[in-house]
Image: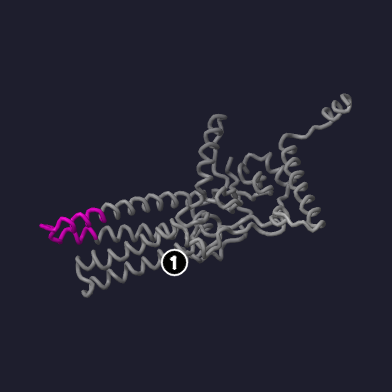
Amino acid sequence: MRERSNCVGHGDHRSSSDLEVLDFSQKVMWREIVAVSLEKNGEPNQTSARLSRPPKESPMKCQRFLSIPVSAVLLLMGFVYYITLFVFIEDWVGLQSSAGSLNALIFSFLGFLCLVSFSACVLIDPGHVPPSYVPDVEQSRASDQEPNNNGAQPRPCDKCFTYKPPRAHHCRICRRCVLRMDHHCMWINNCVGYWNYKAFFVLVLYAAISSIYSTVVLISCSFQKDFSGRVPLKMFYVICGAGMIGLSVTFGTLLGWHVYLIIHNMTTIEYHEGVRAAWLAEKSGQNYRHPFYRSVYQNITSVLGPNMLKWLCPTAVSHLKDGLAFPISHDSL
């Protein structure tokens, strides 16, 4: 027995990456064998169900609106819309005037765009890895030897026991791998990923514009309103002003952050991974560049689409493909 083990040890020249791929493949194969054997014996099981169909969406799309954070966002949108029109604009120029009607029309349109974009973020599935996805293992091994393809190859997911494409990550809340995952947002009760990232970005843009618009109307109304002897009304305006300024700063900062990500063709997860990769590259005397960075225009159109007239439409995503492969920069490290 000792001689046999020594022969095996000396004869096995596989690299550590090959052993990891082999070990993971054996796990997947064993799960499939168990699933098939149980099905032949007429014993249903969760393993075979998960291997035979796409991951189950939980909760269902319409039920996502029933979560407390989503309901809170809808209530906040309704509250801001009401006080902007029927309090601030009414006290400022009056809704019956031409200026008041114009401001009410503009803000109502912004509110409608926010509602449509928010609904798209909640309802659109961010994208999951199809059960039929099988990466080219030989090509992945060869590409691993190229430094220019850092982070751009399929990787195994130990939680799903399947392979995840480049830029896909496992969400512990949704309990599945999400294509081009940016983050999980509790305010939409959904992941922000490949298919709904544009809707999320457009939502942040419209929310920032609406918040700033409402803040400007509130300040304009406050300058010409007489608060003498009306302490409760003055406190109401102060509280609303602080809240609207806070929303404007929050959405403005979030908008700037995602503009930066789009220009560099990054996700939030990839940014944090890139910080570590850049530190390791600098430590070894090399330069790091994000592997998916191309040109600024190509980075923008990869998210918003080639037609500039549809950039601000949250549901115009016909330019997207399957989310399983992405062009790689040849200058990345």
- Front residue of this view, candidates 58 and 122: 58
Picture quadrant where residue 15 is located: top right
Say whether residue 39 is left or right of residue 50: right
Q: Main secondary structure of the magenta part?
A: helix
Q: Please, what is the three-letter code of the amino acid marked with disc 1?
A: Val
Secondary structure, mark 1, is helix
The number of numbered discs placed on residues in the rendered structure image is: 1
The image shows residue 171, relative to residue 72, as above or below, that is: above
Residue 126 magenta: no
Colouring: one colour
User: Residue at (44%, 62%) from the top-left corner?
Assistant: 118
- Front residue of this view, candidates 234 and 263: 234
Using a 10 Å C-alpha cutoff, classify the residue at mark 1 as few (fewer than 14 neighbours), some (14 to 19) or many (20 or more). Answer: some
Picture quadrant where residue 241 is located: bottom left
User: Residue at (30%, 61%) from the top-left corner?
Assistant: 213
User: Residue at (77%, 46%) from the top-left corner?
Assistant: 30
Image coordinates for residue 79, horizontal then vertical, percent: 32, 62
Name the residue furthest left: 228
Residue 222 magenta: yes
The image shows residue 150, relative to residue 87, as above or below, that is: above
The image shows residue 219, relative to residue 279, as above or below, that is: below
Image coordinates for residue 11, horizontal then vertical, percent: 84, 30
Quadrant for the C terminus, please.
top right
Q: Which residues are magenta?
A: 218-240
Image coordinates for residue 59, horizontal then vertical, percent: 55, 59
The residue under label 1 is 116
- Front residue of this view, candidates 122 and 152: 122
Image coordinates for residue 193, horizontal then vertical, percent: 54, 55
Say whether residue 86 is left or right of residue 68: left
